[in-house]
Image (cartoon, grey):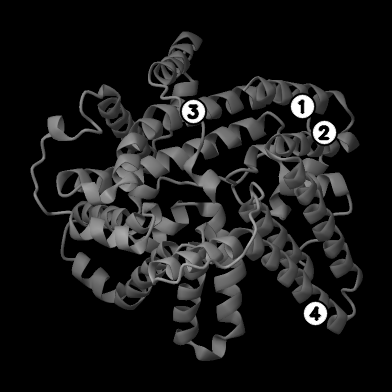
Amino acid sequence: MYYWCSLFILTIILFYSVKRQYQPFILFASSFLFIVVFSVSIALFSIVFTILNYYLGIMLEKYSNKQILKYKLFWLSIVIDVGILVFFKYFFPLFENLNSIFFSSGMYSKLPYGSIMIPVGISYYTFQALGYLIRVDRGSEEAEHNFFAFAAFLLFFPKLLSGPVERSNHFLPQLNNHVKFSINNIESGLRLFLFGLFKKVVIADNLYGAVSSVYGGVHNFAGAPLLLVLIIQPIYIYCDFSGYTDMVLGVSKFFGIKLVNNFDRPFLARNISEFWRRWHISLSSWCNDYIYSSFIIKFRRWKIKAVIFGIFLTFLIVGIWHGANFTFVILGLLQGIAIVYEFYTRRTRLKISSRFPKNLVNTLSRIFVFLFMAISMVFFFANSVKEALYLISHLFRNIDFNPAEIDFIKNKPEFLIALICFSGLFVIEILNEKGRNLLSIYLKQPILIRCFGYLTLLLLSWLFYSGIHTFYYMRF
């Protein structure tokens, strides 16, 4: 922790002390040192990956008038980047799965393979590199000739571990403009960081015990514990991931850089399509722009079939992006099925819903979306398809909901505090959804009231700190 704080403070001092042309270098150097802490070899790999994509972008721009050569170069670039991601993230897990199959079938000899550490953040900066190369190939963006600016775009340390998946045309223009020190950036950054810390430490970390207990031994539970975890797991992952995102956005504001937001009140979505416009926005929008849209344009002659295939392909990739486990494939397919269903039944659903009060329809729709995502997330958290099916099939067996009998919430007031805090957070999101900008109202209050609010968040984070030092999405 001391190292991170020292590196962060030193980066801020140097960033605002140097001229504009050196600011990208400061961010690159800090990001490199950040990766070195994890592994020197991973840090060197990230530099090689960055250099490779830097020159690929320049070459795509250089040969833009030579269509055949550019076409071959572009697909070579895609194959290289995707191949690197597949090798590190899926090759070794695939061999592990094959070895487990051989073992369970009585074939005890293992397939030989070595062990290798997966580079931190590779899922995120590979997608960033792919998006950049696609835009350069399309002529939508000029290649970046400042290596340190490009390296800072790929490896920027606040977003390295779990995103968001930043766009080059959003990040690079900010970095190429001189960033002057602003107390407003520091204040808003601290406020956003503190709010993210509160969501992560007070809510997510104190719900994690229940989720980890069940998925650590799912066959030991049935009925009430499974139902409880089914309901709280979307809340847990939302507060963990959005808390991380808020902290990242807050740190980035210290450098005058505004990253894309990853969440927009997803539990207020009225259908699955809308949910994915509000959840993990940087990934879902990236897949929409570079996979779904590209697919239906290329195969528009298929008409409606292109839309359906495009939806399933997109969510299959979203699922596989999370890992090599078959559970993620099912997770993606479930989302595809739901969105295709919504596509085909839209008119019928609108006709039926028009007969009922709008508020009732919206409320029921949001409940259905939440429950569908809660069931889908069983495949997100489960270690295997078998475990996921066990959990779903045992949800309503031996129902006897007595909190005092459930070990993972017994004598743990922090669990209840987490749910109360989330309820308060949800009320705030509902009011903001209705157009009440509570933040602007809060910022207009006297300084003593504002400081009291900040101190309350700090105090709660200190009182209910559980000692968890990682974020769930760091594993992806």
Badge 3 marks a residue whose secondary structure is helix
Residue for point 33% across, 55% down: 378
According to the image, label 1 marks what residue?
11
Residue 438 visible in this rendered orientation of the protein: no
Q: Nearer the viewer, residue 260 or 379?
A: 379
Residue 57 on image: x %, y %? 83, 63
According to the image, label 3 marks what residue?
197
**Can you tell which mark lies on residue 26?**
2
Whichever of labels 2 and 4 marks the residue nearer the N terminus, that label is: 2
Residue 39 on image: x %, y %? 71, 40
Residue 32 on image: x %, y %? 77, 39
Residue for point 71% across, 39% down: 35
Label 2 crowd (10 A; few <14 / some 14-19 / many >=20): many
- Residue farthest to the top, as pictured: 448
Badge 1 marks a residue whose secondary structure is helix
According to the image, label 4 marks what residue?
71
